[in-house]
């Protein structure tokens, strides 16, 4: 039996990261908003069509800027899925906002657009669709609902860098979009993120909030003769060393995505027979969504004990994972959020979803080992 460990994730390095970091260091530009940050901003703006792209130290920070930009006040409601990472909700709760949790779709596990309107109240300010696994939410419907009710749309596109919906890059469709470059994502800088500002009217304030609430960026552009405190903000920007690292990754973003898509497709083919046997369900990617292979997950058939499957994989040194503990059933979610309707699909996914090892460079042989071990475990369990 082959027992070489197959880790869940292995951060990919393009090879130029240290070279660019050295360039930043010898250029004596270590604080934020130097040449590498500008290059990253330009790349993101060109690639996504956003009116303004701003690097942040995390996607969490980009979401926090969004909450400040939308002027979220105590009691304001923000509609989002419960099946997401904590930052989606926490960023708004920090301003006193109330996350309102709505169920997800059976197919993509994204916020169910048909349930959003039923969650709107006189306090609702925004909708936060989360593009799970880099597969787009039904954005046309989200935008139409937002327009009908005068709401803002903030895309949590943490997992959606290089993905698109009807050819439009994720993060560039709503009023605001948040990207993550955390080491567990596709394009990385350790910790890192970006805010995409698509609503032009918000662009100048976004810059101010990100720079400690000051108009420092305008000062550096020579638009004002001194910079001063303008409004609430914080330090949300990364230093140049992070931006230099990120630049090495953005340069290769296309190749990184193609490579991951090939591995994703290999799992998809390997697991087809298990789906036909009714032992699991594979991910669904709607026709008009181009995804980025951020994740390969399966939903185990009901009655299969996920922990037993995880244990059997672990015994063969295969490190699979699950997530999320739905926010509505976590202590923070119960304290700060509220549920709208039944979260049946959310609860079911939380019990049955299994994420398989996927990273750039995983070999066909390793993927076959994962699929074979999973098959054996499922046949024993089913
Ligand atoms: C990773 C992730 C985040 C947080 O990203 P950070 O860059 O670590 O702050 C937020 N939302 C979702 C859906 C994520 O997957």
Image (tube, rainbow, N blue to C red):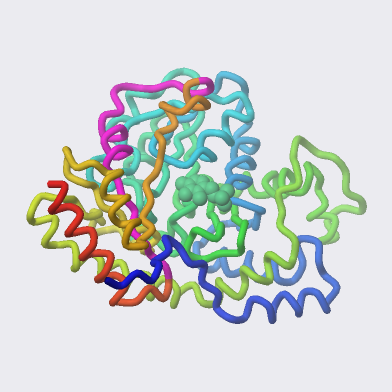
User: Left or right of 44: which side holds 151?
Assistant: left
Where 144 falls versus 48 (above or below)? above
284, 375: nearer the viewer: 375
User: Left or right of 115: which side holds 334?
Assistant: right
Q: Could you say where residue 199 lies in the image, as x and y percent from the top left?
A: 56, 47
Residue span colored magenta: 335-359
286, 262: nearer the viewer: 262
Q: Could you say where residue 376 lies in the image, as x and y percent from the top left?
A: 17, 59
Residue farthest left in this picture: 277
The image quadrant that residue 234 belongs to is: top right
At x 42%, y 42%, the residue is 129
Residue farthest front in this picture: 1
Q: Could you say where residue 352 lies in the image, as x and y percent from the top left?
A: 27, 42
User: Left or right of 161: which side holds 93?
Assistant: right
Where 258 falls versus 75 (above or below)? below
Q: Could you say where residue 273 lies in the image, as x and y percent from the top left?
A: 11, 62
Whether residue 349 is visible here, answered yes or no, is: yes
At x 34%, y 39%, the residue is 111
The image quadrant that residue 24 belongs to is: bottom right
Where 89 falls versus 8 (above or below)? above
The image quadrant that residue 35 belongs to is: bottom right
Is 346 a magenta residue? yes
Which quadrant, please, contains the N terminus?
A: bottom left
At x 78%, y 42%, the residue is 213
């Amino acid at each position: 039996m082959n027992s070489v460990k197959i880790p869940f994730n292995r951060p990919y390095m393009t090879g130029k990261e240290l070279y660019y970091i050295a360039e930043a260091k010898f250029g004596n530009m270590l604080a934020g908003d130097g040449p590498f940050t500008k290059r990253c901003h330009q790349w993101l703006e060109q690639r996504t069509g956003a009116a303004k792209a701003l690097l942040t130290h995390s996607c969490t920070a980009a979401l926090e800027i969004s909450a400040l930009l939308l002027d979220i006040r105590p009691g304001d409601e923000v509609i989002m899925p419960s099946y997401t990472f904590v930052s989606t909700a926490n960023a708004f709760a920090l301003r006193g906002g109330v996350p309102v949790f709505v169920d997800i779709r059976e197919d993509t596990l994204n916020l169910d657009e048909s349930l959003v309107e039923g969650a709107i109240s006189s306090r609702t300010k925004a909708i936060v669709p989360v593009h799970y696994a880099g597969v787009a939410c039904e954005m046309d419907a989200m935008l139409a609902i937002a327009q009908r009710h005068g709401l803002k749309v903030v895309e949590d596109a943490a997992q959606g860098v290089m993905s698109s919906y009807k050819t439009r890059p994720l993060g560039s469709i709503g009023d605001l979009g948040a990207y993550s470059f955390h080491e567990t994502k596709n394009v990385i800088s350790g910790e890192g993120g970006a805010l995409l500002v698509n609503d032009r009217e918000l662009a100048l304030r976004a810059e101010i909030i990100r720079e400690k609430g000051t108009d420092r960026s305008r000062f550096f552009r020579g638009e004002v003769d001194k910079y001063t405190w303008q409004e609430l903000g914080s330090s949300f920007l990364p230093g140049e060393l992070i931006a230099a690292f990120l630049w090495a990754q953005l340069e290769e973003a296309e190749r990184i995505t193609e490579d991951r898509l090939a591995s994703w497709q290999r799992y998809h083919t390997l697991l087809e027979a298990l789906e036909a046997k009714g032992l699991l369900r594979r991910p669904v990617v709607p026709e008009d969504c181009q995804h980025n292979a951020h994740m390969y997950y399966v939903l185990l058939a009901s009655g299969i004990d996920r922990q037993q499957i995880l244990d059997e994989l672990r015994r063969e040194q295969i490190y699979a994972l699950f997530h999320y503990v739905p926010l509505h059933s976590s202590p923070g979610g119960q304290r700060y959020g509220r549920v709208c309707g039944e979260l049946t699909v959310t609860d079911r996914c939380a019990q049955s979803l299994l994420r398989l090892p996927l990273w750039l460079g995983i070999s066909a042989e390793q993927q076959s080992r994962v699929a074979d071990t999973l098959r054996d475990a499922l046949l024993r369990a089913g």
